[in-house]
Amino acid sequence: MAKEEVLAQKQVVIDEVTDKLNNASSVVVAEYRGLTVAEATELRRALRAEGVEFKIYKNKLVKRATEATGNEGLDEYLTGPNALAFGHEDAVAPARVLAKFAKTHKNLVIKAGIVEGKLVGTDEIQELSKLPDRKGMYSMLLACLKDPMAKVARVINAVAEAREGAAPAAEEAAPAAE
């Protein structure tokens, strides 16, 4: 009976990880060996501020979940004490926060991840970490759209000013002809 309860509890965890893997826009696997409690708390706060969920699961249970989701490529990175960072809203947030933290804390090692369903290695995660957050992307997009719109507005304004300048001259010429 106790064995069945343990198996049921493990299945609940596998289902939880499977659900998170299916619903996350990105997942990053990081080894946290050597981090102090204070450093781990600091990391969790930074991740939570970006809307990233940071969880520690047994590697064997994560491997079962990756089989269920078709992400078996992640299995080779699941050795040692690992934690998973799940990004739901911003696919780049886990990579950005973990890479920034790893620069100052050498005990945090980023191993691999899944971004938009594709397995990525450490190099790709480092490249993703350089991208701005969602707000930064929006502001960059708006800046790109603003410049051409400002040019169009200046041209329209110049045409309107030119017409206003030509209209009084035409009115002055019309009474003189009569």
Image (spheres, rainbow, N blue to C red):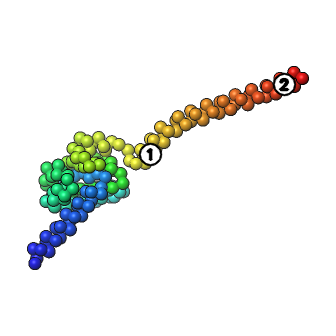
Q: Which circle, 1 or 2, is nearer the viewer?
A: 2
Identified by mark 1, the residue type is Tyr
Image quadrant in which the N terminus is located: bottom left
From the top left corner, tell me how far across and down residue 138 is, in percent: 44, 45
Instruction: Pick out the residue farthest to the bottom.
Output: 1
Q: Disc 1 on helix, strand or loop?
A: helix
From the top left corner, tell me how far across and down residue 60 is, in percent: 13, 59
Q: Residue at x 17, y 56 (%)?
A: 67
Q: Which residue is mark 2?
A: 174
Say whether marks 1 and 2 touch (CB < 8 Å): no
Q: Which mark is residue 138?
A: 1
Q: Residue at x 21, y 44 (%)?
A: 121
Q: Residue at x 25, y 56 (%)?
A: 21
Q: Which mark is residue 92?
A: none
Which label's residue is closer to the chain start, 1 or 2? 1
Res. 106 visible in picture: no
Image quadrant in which the C terminus is located: top right
From the top left corner, tell me how far across and down residue 50 is, in percent: 36, 54
From the top left corner, tell me how far across and down residue 122 is, in percent: 22, 44
Identified by mark 2, the residue type is Ala
Query: 60 left or right of 53?
Result: left
Q: Dot 1, crowdedness within 10 Å: few (<14), some or many (≥20)?
A: few
Q: Residue at x 65, y 33 (%)?
A: 157
Query: 105 left or right of 138?
Result: left
